Image (cartoon, rainbow, N blue to C red):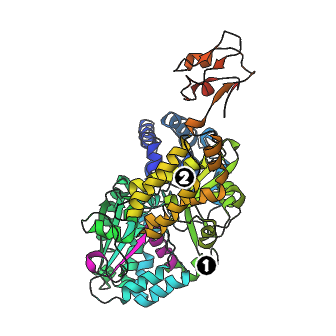
Amino acid sequence: MKVVIGQGSCGVATGARKTAAEFERQIAEKKIKADVDITGCVGTCYLEPIVDIYDDDGKMTRYVKVQPDKVEKIVEDHLINSRIAEEQAITEEDKQFIEKQHRVVLRNCGVINPEKIDEYIAVDGYKAIAKVLSEMKPEEVIEEIKISGLRGRGGAGFPTWFKWNAAKQSPGNEKYLVCNADEGDPGAFMDRSVLEGDPHSLIEGMIIGGYAMGATQGVIYCRAEYPLAIKRLEIAMDQAREKGFLGKNILGSGFDFDLRIKAGAGAFVCGEETALIASLEGERGMPRLKPPFPAAKGYWQKPTDINNVETLANVPWIIYNGGAAFGAMGTEKSKGTKVFALAGKIKKGGLVEVPMGLTLREVIYGIGGGIKNDRKFKAVQMGGPSGGCIPAELIDTPVTYEDINKTGAIVGSGGMIVMDEDTCMVDMARYFLNFTRDESCGKCNYCRIGTKRMLEILERITEGEGKDGDIELLEELAMKIKDGSMCGLGQTAPNPVLTTLKYFRSEYEDHIYKKKCTAASCKALITYSITDACKGCTLCSKHCPADAISGSVKEKHVIDTYKCVKCGKCLDTCKFGAIVKA
């Protein structure tokens, strides 16, 4: 019998290590024959800590939200008395979160121990590289990737085979393959989960890519804020070297390839290829003009290919199962599966992997369970700060590169931040623009100064000081920033503003002309009042930090709007729903 506890970052953050320690204590104390092991995140982050118990016959039972105080009951029921501990067992509804997915990249996450290479090998790991080195020429590998239709999963969706082929055809004996694991989009955690839960799939994908383009050295550029991912990558690389999958003369084929990790300094702009290369070389992460492209002159002016984690983690599956099998999923132009991170006002937050072509509705409601507290769906932000907001009326948009681009957003790396009716779209645009303003490297005037000017306008609007002409000025600045910026950060920074202006222009107008926040979210534009439902219980006045509420016991109270600091404590404490904000 084996007890497996999910210990990705989400599990650890919710107490999985304490849960594991309690299982070990109980098992030792009660002399139960069972092993305690770890795995990565299975994707159902909203159910962490997650515990899977494998019986001797291989049957798995999943328990969710297992805090240390729940362990004894599970041990007594399941490990001792061989019955399901129903209170913590996963429900049939929550099982659907995984069962409705089609997992390629996430196939091993939450299933194997990421720190044991033998478990990866047991699920056909490293068979793809064995096939490549024994049966395929580099040209045949690239052709198989071409047949699959795999496009870059980091943002732009550029054909993977084309980048590999460009690097292969560039003259020179010294070439590099770089993995961009500098996942910086707010609300995105796809790459982190793969690195923590199945690092060998990335390593194997990079070995195959290196063989295809003639590179003997690979670099994983991983953000320093992912310490657990870096730790497990280091363990996996050491184990791969011991088994002969990394280093000199891999599997006796004569092919050499090795990897190293570079911890990124936390700059969002280093998601851009040339800025990433500058950072690798020890310089400040700033983009340069292209051409020449990295495939011709990249790291140390040598031919370099750069792919993100999800792209490379697809490669072993494609090679082992055939490019046609991957291409059979998805749509004609957007093939295969895509991993999305569901965050925000969603009932079931976590990771989902689905064939491209499913609609936003099927992802948000069919898998994600819909909006928290059954509120009304308002919009979804896709593509991070470089993307845009897609409104409720477009919820049946298929998730493909082409269809999402038509809305003004992008698929990007796969973040989906879901918003409900209480979200102010002007403030949402302000939030993302503040992020890109902070992350601008400062090289381009339009990006460095233009985003600051746009942010100042948005801040004025959300503080109730917007004025006539602000909307037109935002649009003018946005287009000039897009046209005048060198790299993708500046070129896409205005997207959240442009899409919210396109679909939610009335909210901007309400802020400016009516001095009203439609979502009752912007603090400067909120007013609190007490209705006739007030019972005079005095709770609101007792909790008001500004002494802005007055009234006698058992009589209706009133709020002095001049004293009110709009903290919302009165709304939170009222038991009768007598306080409203508008």
Between residue 141 and residue 239, name the one nearer to us.
Answer: 141
In the rendered view of the protein, which quadrant contains the C terminus? Answer: top right
- Read off the magenta span: 294-318
Measured along the vertical axis of the image, is residue 299 above or below residue 474?
Answer: below
Residue 426 appears in the figure:
yes
- Horizontal side of 177 relative to 378 (left or right) equals left
Please, what secondary structure does the residue beneath circle 1 have? Answer: loop
- Please state if 223 lies on the left or on the right of 374 as rendered: left
Q: Amino acid at mark 2?
A: Ala
**Badge number at residue 333:** 1
**x, y (%) of residue 418?**
61, 52
How far is the residue under mark 1 from the one under mark 2?
A: 30 Å
- Report the side of 483 relative to 420 (left or right): left
Instruction: Tell me the SS state at disc 2.
Output: helix
Q: How many marks?
A: 2
Residue at the far right in the pictured view: 532
Q: Position of residue 36 (x, y in %)?
A: 44, 48
- Mark sitting earlier along the chain (1/2): 1
Q: Is residue 519 magenta?
A: no
Residue 378 sits above or below residue 120 on the image: above
Kindly indicate the quadrant of the structure image that contains residue 113: bottom left
| 194 vs 82, nearest the viewer | 194
Q: Quadrant of residue 234?
A: bottom left
Q: Are marks 1 and 2 in contact (CB under 8 Å)?
A: no
Q: Is residue 154 visible?
A: no
Q: Which residue sits at x=50%, y=79%?
A: 159
Mark 1: give few (<14), some (14-19) or many (20+) Cα within 10 Å: some
| Residue receiving disc 2 | 429
Q: Where residue 499 appears, x then y in whole percent?
A: 60, 60
Along the line of sight, which residue is nearer the eye, 379 or 57?
Answer: 379
Residue 340 place in picture, x, y as percent: 56, 60
Residue visible at 55% across and 37% down in the picture: 76
